[in-house]
Amino acid sequence: MKAKYWRRTLLSVLEEPAIAIPDELEPLFRAHHALVFRAAYRITGNAGDAEDAMQTVFLRMLRRGRNAEPMENPESYLRRAAINAALDVVRARQNDQTIPLPEESSGLLPAVPVQADVSGLRQALSRAMGQLKPRPAEIFVLRFLEGLSNRQIAESLGISQVLVAVIVHRTRQQLRKELRPYLHR
């Protein structure tokens, strides 16, 4: 970029009014940004996508504004928001059209190490979770990736423990079916 255009761009950025961040958002971000990132990372499997999800969560909080009702349990809310944002990222990634690389039969690629199987399984799990409806995906993540008990999930979502158990069971069955090629080698 030519210097004069760079300078014009820099000046326009410097002259823009600063974004007003509500006083409540900064302490919320400082206290919970790591939790949001971890929850998103467990679903997306990469830091860049997790950061995108985290940014989405806090931008949504910013848009909520000062007029929004105060959160009763911000940790639970932000964890759920991170899960949903990460699932959105996974679904968007699935919509990208990609062309698979040829197998090693061409002789151009080195033999695939065993670690690639784990990576493939992780990608398959991510794709399978992207196919789930939002509520089952959220409950599965809270149970198995965040480590919450069925009781904690039920309290957090305002539903019964029995419903949580049923959703967990059905979701596990669905994911097993999707991941069968990776589980029976």
Image (spheres, rainbow, N blue to C red):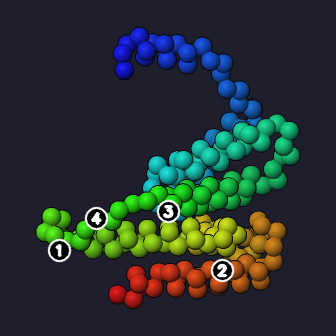
Indicate which disc, 2 or 3, sits on the residue closer to the N terminus: 3
**x then y, percent, for residue 183:** 42, 85
> In the image, 47: left or right of 151?
left
Q: Quadrant of residue 153?
A: bottom right
Q: In 3D space, how far apart are the residues under numbered discs 3 and 4 (Cα atoms)?
A: 17 Å
Comparing 76 with 97, the one in front is 97
The amino acid pointed to by label 3 is: Gln
Point 24% across, 71% down: residue:
103
**x then y, percent, for residue 143:** 63, 72
Question: Disc 2 on helix, strand or loop?
Answer: helix
Q: In 3D space, how far apart are the residues under numbered discs 4 and 1 (Cα atoms)?
A: 11 Å
Mark drawn on residue 185: none
Point 52% across, 52% down: residue:
50
Indicate which disc, 3 or 4, sits on the residue closer to the N terminus: 3
Asked if the residues shown at circle 4 and circle 1 are in contact, with their CB atoms under 8 angstroms apart, the answer is no
The residue where tag 3 is placed is 94
Question: Disc 3 on helix, strand or loop?
Answer: helix
The amino acid pointed to by label 1 is: Ser
From the image, state whether disc 2 or disc 4 is nearer to you. Answer: 4
The residue where tag 1 is placed is 105
Indicate which disc, 3 or 1, sits on the residue closer to the N terminus: 3
Point 67% across, 26% down: residue:
19
Evaluate whether residue 46 shows in this view. yes
Mark drawn on residue 101: 4
The amino acid pointed to by label 4 is: Leu
Q: In 3D space, how far apart are the residues under numbered discs 3 and 1 (Cα atoms)?
A: 27 Å
Evaluate whether residue 148 shows in this view. no
Mark 4 packing: few (<14 Cα in 10 Å), some, or many (20+)? Answer: few
Location of the N terminus (image quadrant): top left
